[in-house]
Amino acid sequence: MGYEYFDSDELKLLRESVRNFAKAEIAPLAHDLDEKEQFSIPLTAKMGEMGFFGTVVPTKYGGQGMDYLSYIVVVEELARIDGSQAATIAAHNSLGAAPLYYYGNDDQKKKYLPSLCDGRGLWGFGLTEPEAGSDAQASKTNAVWNESKKKWILNGSKIWITNSASEITKGITVQAVTGRKSDGRPELSCFIVEAGAPGLTARAMKGKMMWRASNTGELYFDNVEVAPENMLGEKGQGFKIMMETLDNGRLSIGAMGLGLAKGALELTVKYANERKTFGQSISKHQVVAFKIAEMAMRIEAAEGLLYKACWLKQTNRPFSKVAAMAKLYCSEVAEYCAREGQQTFGGYGLMKEYPIERHYRDAALLRIGEGTSEIQRLVISRLVGC
Ligand code: COS
């Protein structure tokens, strides 16, 4: 099977409609929301009306039933205009709804997924902790079974959890230690914790340099009671659920990088054609033209890598290695294009009024979030035999 479906009529139409929406509805607000560091519930609801939530969830659970590449194109087109809105969509679909769909039983899917498919409800992915980032098995959050209450009791904290502390957050999937394995490693399990559970405190984190209009939360669990039916997957399967979810999530971070790079290129070409120095458009100066050529070439390579990873996933082939490569490479291309674009804009590129400045800041997250560039290199090196 070839890659020809990358350019199907359906995909072109989808791309065009997301692009038009992003230009009409997101672009006019992006600067202000970024400036005020404000998450927008109305804009999130509009993205819901467009069908950007529950993208790969089947229609029987209220989702859109899209294939994976279509979802990736949605994220890419949003990121072309604004990293914050793309982040809300990527985190919700890949890390919020996806584990419930892939690992939930039918009761859990029926109970939670429909409210996560219309832009009126968000779900967070509770993996990272203050002392467990790259070393994701080092979780300290624990869940202890209380026989008299017939409940799990959760204590601990999570940090940098996208979509976890908004007014429309419905819940979080939480990794917690439920025991020790025979070799001494922690036994990790996943729990569905509903927003507003007694003992759960969710605080929106402020002062971010990037994705400022997305919601990022810090969570504290103080004797939070969780019913046994709210364990996600099997006891002890938690780390695998989290790792497999991140394999998928890397594709959407790749899409954020690719979209940002394409957005930066578009802004740069337009500016370079308009701006004149030494009697001609700066795009006619070789130094600028070659910069733009380099950006375009790297974008083409990043797109090939990302779409290949999507194709591997979509056709049920092993995709972890290429997904890690796509996440890593698209992040690097995004940062390169944002920096070279900003350089082309000169002094204007340093001003908040110009979207290239926001792209420059947003690009930084991509080499740190959802597994740093170093972790991607570790994953790739292991998968090629190191
Ligand atoms: N899919 C399924 N299972 C996986 C897996 C994957 N992608 N990666 C690891 N596992 C399994 C292993 O097979 C192993 O299973 P057993 O216990 O049955 O042997 C187990 O998980 C532990 O694997 P490993 O020993 O390789 O884990 P490490 O502690 O060395 O950690 C890395 C592996 C570094 C890859 C992991 O900690 C990681 O991804 N860290 C980054 C976390 C991250 O991205 N955080 C950002 C979150 S923001 S949303």
Image (tube, rainbow, N blue to C red):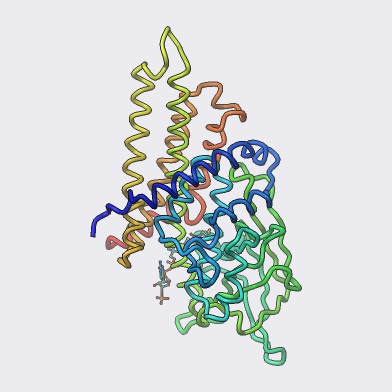
Percent position of residue 345, x then y:
50, 23
Residue 48 placement (x, y as % from top left): 59, 56
Determine the image quadrant of residue 348.
Answer: top right
**Quadrant (top left, top right, bottom left, bottom right) of the N terminus:** bottom left
Outermost residue, top side: 279
Nearest the eye: 10 or 53? 10
Tell me which residue sits at (43%, 20%) in the image: 273
Where, by quadrant of the figure, is residue 302 drawn? top left
Residue 287 percent across, percent down from the top left:
36, 20
The C terminus, quarter of image: bottom left
Point out the quarter of the image occupied by ligand 1. Answer: bottom left
The residue sitting at 57% across, 63% down in the picture is: 117
Q: How many marks?
A: 0
Q: Quadrant of residue 248?
A: bottom left
Residue at the image position 48 percent from the left and 69 percent from the top? 58
Depth check: give the residue in front, 290 or 127. Answer: 290
Q: Is residue 127 above or below residue 305?
A: below
The residue lying furthest to the right in this view is 198
Q: Residue furthest left?
A: 1
Q: Determine whether 164 is above or below 241 in the image.
A: above
Left or right, 38 with respect to 315, comes to right
Q: Position of residue 141 (x, y in %)?
A: 62, 71
Looking at the image, residue 148 sits to the left or right of residue 173; the answer is right
